[in-house]
Structure formats: structure tokens, C-alpha cells
Amino acid sequence: MFNFGILLPDLLSILTVVPRTIAMAVTIFVFATILGSVFTLIEHRRIPVLRELVIAYKVFFKGVPMVIAIFLAYFGLPPAFEFIASLVGLEINGYATPSWVLLIIALVGCLAAFQAEVIKGALNSFDTGQADAAHSLGYTNIQMSRRILLPQIVVAAIPDLATSLMVTMKALSLGFAISVVDIFAQAQLTAALNYYYLEAFVVAVVVYMTISYTITRGADMLERSLRVW
Amino acid sequence: MNVSTMIPELLEALPLTLAIMFVALAAGFCLALLTTTFRVRRVLLISTLADLYVSYARSVPVVLQLFIAFYGLPVLVGAFGIEDFLSANLAAMVGLSLYHGGYLSEVMRPAYLAVDRGQHDAADSLGYTFQQKIARVVGPQAVHIALPGYGNSIIYLIHNVALIMYIGAADVMATAHLIMARDFNQYQFETYLLLAVFYSLLCLIAWMIIRFFENRASIYTLSNKPAKFSLTASV
């Protein structure tokens, strides 16, 4: 029933895509964090019209399953690219956009909404008394953010950021629907060659759990070494 | 695209989708109760297994969990002598229950731990058994703390029900794919927009129900600090 001999070849085959998956996950994570920070800044500063737009954006992306968002990007972005290019007078073929680019854009869009919550939570943990103290010492806003705010909220956000990096990793598994090959898709492709589906998927589970364990432990160690008080 | 004929067709697949969802909700809840009990009581070996199960449910993509259930069930059932057993709907129920149970356990445990330490101690010193303590003292307070996290987990379950079409269950997504294929794939973007609205409505209804209970449960609260639930997506 369960072929143990096939596990090692499957593992070797799946390991070949691990660097690519991690690279894509990190890219998405970085862009989503940047976009999420911009959203948090807009909400924090209460910029009139943009604030409502950000709230609507968040409601949309939290209510819609990620698969559907990915398909929307897959079918909606190429014509949108062509349209935008035609506005500046360029003639491009939007349908030639590689699907991994579309996947990255879709996931950055989805995860930015959640990343904004993570950053907002970290920002709320900051004691505003410290900002007042800094201002009374004559710090400018930028100095205050760089020397007092950032070092604290970065440390406070580490556990949640580690979780969301893992979430990004898992979200990439939905990319197989638009033919992007990550760990899960590679497991499926490997299994399709030798028909040992369960075995390949079990190997993929082990790979995912190992990566998750590494990320969690790494984040713990980072937090402990950065936390000064 | 003819929306007026498409919506009834999609709604025909709704009962199956909801059935799978409710089975996962109920089974996942029982599973989470069991897992959380083992995790907070530290039974030798069983607690470690419970921890391992929760980290499986949380660190493996739901698609992969569904496929594991789909291909794993026949092997499991085959051990009891039943051959050629392959059911997408049952696999979807099992896979989503396992996912929801693990996710929910990670909501219940912080809620249990967030109830004021003194309440646990008082119950213990009065000689309450574990069941009595949960039922009379800690449980009612933990419910209030856990409700926001429970609402999130239901919404994530609704999101992940959209994935069961990949193992071949005939849910709303699969029906939409059939309709798209019948229309020669002309209106894919529009169909997915419709699906987005559809799932948003489902989430909105779930959210409103949870909000109703949140307001009701607030009568049990002492001055408990809310447990911290990080709002990260779950796929």
C-alpha cells in the first residue's frame, strides 16, 4: 500500500524547488510588508479619502478566498496591463506575462491586507509616553521613529512576521492552479510520473513542517537576541 | 454572460458546500476540544502527539491537507479490509475537519490560558475536578475571550472550503468551472468576480452571527484581558 522506497527519490525531487519557493515567498513577504506599512501609515495619520479606500481594500481581501483572488489576477491583470500600456501609446502583449509574476502580484495584494494588521498591532504596543519624552528632548519626528519607535516595534512584530512568512509560503501552494511550480506542485508533478501520490504528499508535508519549524525557531532566537529589556 | 441563469445553478451546489462546511465545523470543534484538553493537561506522549497534530494543521497548506486526506483515507480504510474506497466529499470533510480542529485548538488554548490565574487556583482549591472547573468557572469566561478568534477561524474555513474542488468535490467553485467551460471560457473574470461576491456574503453572514454571540457572551466577562490573536491569513 505504502511504498517506502519511493520516499527518498521524491524528497530529492521536491528539494530542487525549495530554494525557488523560499525566494518567491520572501519577495512576496517583503513587498506585502511594505504595502502593509503604507496602509498602516495612512490609517494612523487619518488621511481623509485614502483611509476609507484602505478600509474598503482590507474588507475586500479579507472576505475573498485567496484562490479566487489569484484567478481574478490571472484573468484580469493581462488585459489591464495592455490597457495601461495603450494609454501611454505602447503595444504590449499582456498575456505573455509569466504566471509567477501574476501570482506574486495577487499574493502581495492579498497578504498586504493582513500584513497591515500585524504592523498595526505592533504599533499599538508602542508606549506613546516614550514619543512624548523624545519630543521633549528635542528629537525630530524622523529621529524619534528611527531611534525609539522602530527598534521596539520591529522586535514586537517578530513572532507575527514569522507566522506571516509561513503563511506566504503556504499561500504559494495555490499557485499550482495557474501553473506555478512550488513545493506542493512539485510533489504533484513527481507523483504524476510514478503514481505514488500519497508518498509524494507525505514528503511534501515533512518538507513544509521542517521549514515552518526552522522559521519559528529562527524567529525565537532573533527575538531573544534583539530584545534588550 | 447570463447572470440570472448562473446564480441558480451555483446555488444548486450550495447545499453540498454548506454540508461539508458544517461537518467540518462540528467535527473540528470536537477535535479541538479534545486536542486542547490534552495540550493543557500535559498527558505523557499524547500531549506531544497533540502538539504535532496542531503544527501539522497550521504549517501545511490546506490544499496539501486535502490531498493527504483524499489519498490517505483509502489506505486507512484498506487496513480494515474495505477495498477501492475513494470519496471526494468524505475526504473533503475529513481534511477540513482536521484543518479546522488544529487551527481552533490554537484559539482555545490561549483563551484558556488568558483566564485569570486566580480563577484557576480558586477552582482548584475548592476541589473542583477538571471537568467541573471547565464547565463552571473557566469555560464561560474563556468563551468570551475566544469568540473573536473563533470568528476568524470560521471565516478561514469558509475561504478554504473553496479549495475542495481540487480533490473533485462538486462544490460551488467546481460548478462555476463547469459553467465557464460550457461558455467556452469567455467570461472567466466576470465569473470569478461573482464568486468573490458570493464568498464575501457567506463570510459576512458568519461574521454577523459571531458578532451577535460576542455581544451576548460579554455578560460573563470579569475584567479579563482579551487574548492576543494575530490576524494572519490561513491557507
Image (cartoon, helix red, strand yellow):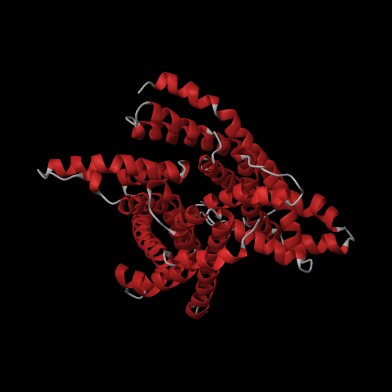
The image quadrant where one finds the N terminus of chain B is top left
Residue B26: give x, y in percent of width and height: 69, 41
Q: Residue at x 71, y 49 (%)?
A: B78
Residue at image location 73% in from the left, 47% down from the top? B30
On the image, the x and y values in percent for residue A38 come to 33, 56
Q: Quadrant of residue A91?
A: top left
Observer-nearest residue: A72 or A51?
A72
Residue B183 appears in the figure: yes
- What residue is rendered at 67% in x and 45% in y? B218
The front one of B212 and B203 is B203
The residue lying furthest to the left in this view is A89
Image height of A228 relative to B106, above or below: below
Observer-nearest of A74 and A14: A14
Q: Position of residue B108 (x, y in %)?
A: 67, 54
Q: Is residue A164 above or below residue B181?
A: below
Q: Quadrant of residue B176?
A: top left
Give the residue at x 36% y 26%: B183
User: In the shown orientation, is residue A19 left or right of residue B99?
Assistant: left
Visible in this render: residue A126?
A: no
In this view, which residue lies farthest toward the top?
Answer: B4
Q: Position of residue B185 (x, y in %)?
A: 34, 31
* Number of callouts: 0
Q: Residue furthest right?
A: B127
